[in-house]
Image (cartoon, rainbow, N blue to C red):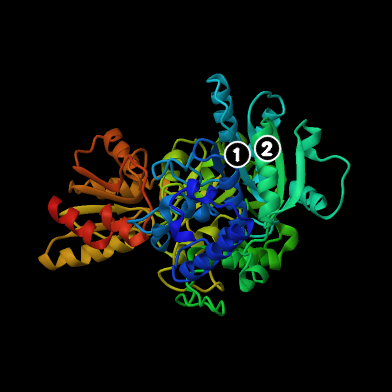
Amino acid sequence: MLSNIKNPHDLRAIQSINQLNELSTEIRGFLINTLSEIDHAHFSANLGVVELTLALHYSFETPEDLLFWDIGHQGYVHKMLTGRLSEIVKIRTKTSVSGFLSRSESVYDVFGAGHAGTSISAALGASIANKIRHSKVHHVAIIGDASLGSGMAFEALNHLSDLKNINLTVVINDNNCSIDASVGGMSKHLQHLANSSIDQTIFENLGLAYAGPYDGHDLESLIDVFSACKKTGGIHVIHCITKKGKGYFPAENGMDAHWHAPGKFDANTGANLSPAKTTRYQDVFAATLIALATDNPKIVAITAGMLSGTSLGQFQKHFPDRCFDVGIAEQHAVTLAAGLSTQGVVPFCAIYSTFMQRGFDQVIHDVALQNLPVVFCVDRAGLVGHDGATHQGVFDIAFFRIIPNLFIASPSNAKDLKNLLYSSQEKLSGPLVIRYPRGKVDAEVTYDSYSFIEIGKGRCLQKGKDLLVFCLGTVLNEALLAIKALEKNSVSIGLYDMIFVKPLDEALLHEALAIGAPVVTIEEGTLIGGFGSSIAEFILTHGYKNKLVRLGLPDEFISHGSQNEQREEYGLDAKGIAKQLSNLL
């Protein structure tokens, strides 16, 4: 039946619940067989929402009625039912559809979703707009139990309790899990609701009509309750219990973090078929922190719902009382770190670059303004590949640079990452950002010895008189390859690993710029306000006349594809850098 479903109108033409159950089985089989052959797909979350997605599209008149999905990891079934079935085999590749929700893709993708906790706010805004327009369409916000614990979701529920005469159904997809197990009081409250009767729920205390919990895999019951919401209108909170990985035994019973995005695997056995795991920058971060914390009892680690993604799960095993996963709550994570710091504790707060955007105010107001020595370990800095526009870590240099008292480092290799972490554990005079990329390290490191890296000090790797190349971060490795190729033509190129964008190594810059040669800056971040801008400001401030060319990312959102494809497209691979340096020479 699946190949005959071109849109939800075809789905709603099916009259038999037995046929709908057969369709759910077919969808699950398609997901297992297709996604097992893709190295970069989200898996178990999509198996968990098959019936839920079918019931929503069957009960509501989409696209006239509007579905607001939270995050989008679980949006594959939605895409399959809305005309994009053939694209799933190429999902998250450069030439195909995004792994998240995207308004540019389909009228059914009502609101873009890549960060958690947005769905209720967005649906609420649309509901109010349609009330003003006297429209009777219905709005549905689908939010996971982990996302429901984010501050933004609480804010939206608080606002929702004051409103009347809107048509909005909040569907809680409760699988007691995000990537890792859900944490916090809201998760515990939902578990109590799932396992025992409670006189009154938090939702009813807020004045919201609550119903459930329902079996999120019982199509008939789901269709009944959603159809009733559609018929009666108004505001509803519907609690559905689902199983992440439903219908695939290894994913149902295995480690959730692995099956969230497992890479290629044998669909029959669940055996991993992806290349052997290599050491990643996040692993070096966690291993270094474990080694340092063994000798330094002041060290604590914080993350916001990314225990596995930051590799802090290993730290938690060693130091369960010194590791805090606060759930999808970046603002709280930052200010928690600030509070810890006031009492002499050394907090290492590990948050992806894309999610660090959500704690911007707290970094300014609660950390930098008070000049507290918090270490922000900014993972996934730079191009992230298949996650695409919602997750690219390309803005952090620019938005951190404007904050007083804040130091910003971007090591070019795993050894420097290790040594920066070591150097930051004591006697910081203010907050420090250490940003590092997604992906495997350039070389393995050991954790039995360290070197101190002074704040604001870079290094000259080689001197030159024809061209001066200043690099920030791991793009240095591509620049080295490019320069090696150009030096065959007897040109003299100076190469500098700046390490810090704030403060800049002014002595090193003065020495280099005095040569008078043209300058090239290279960074894996936005050109507006980034590392290259800081060098331009330095040149202007000090009256140097060196010609300046900045290589980095343009003023646009970077779409999905592999990291290599993205670097090639924007001229940040060795070949692209060599071409641009050659043109300048």
Under mark 2, the amino acid is: Cys
Q: Is the residue 535 above or below the residue 77 in the image?
A: above
Residue at disc 1, secondary structure: strand
Q: Is residue 338 left or right of residue 489?
A: right
Residue in the image at 34% along x and 41% along y: 556
Residue 401: in sight, yes or no?
yes
**Mark 1 burial class by Cα count in 10 Å: few <14, some 14-19, many 20+:** many
**Mark 2 burial class by Cα count in 10 Å: few <14, some 14-19, many 20+:** many
Residue in the image at 57% along x and 47% along y: 58
Residue at disc 2, secondary structure: helix
Residue located beneath label 1 in the image = 140
Outermost residue, left direction?
A: 489
Q: Nearer the viewer, residue 79 or 349?
A: 79
Q: Contact (CB < 8 A) between labels 2 and 1?
A: no
Residue located beneath label 2 in the image = 229
Q: CA distance from mark 2 to mark 1?
A: 10 Å
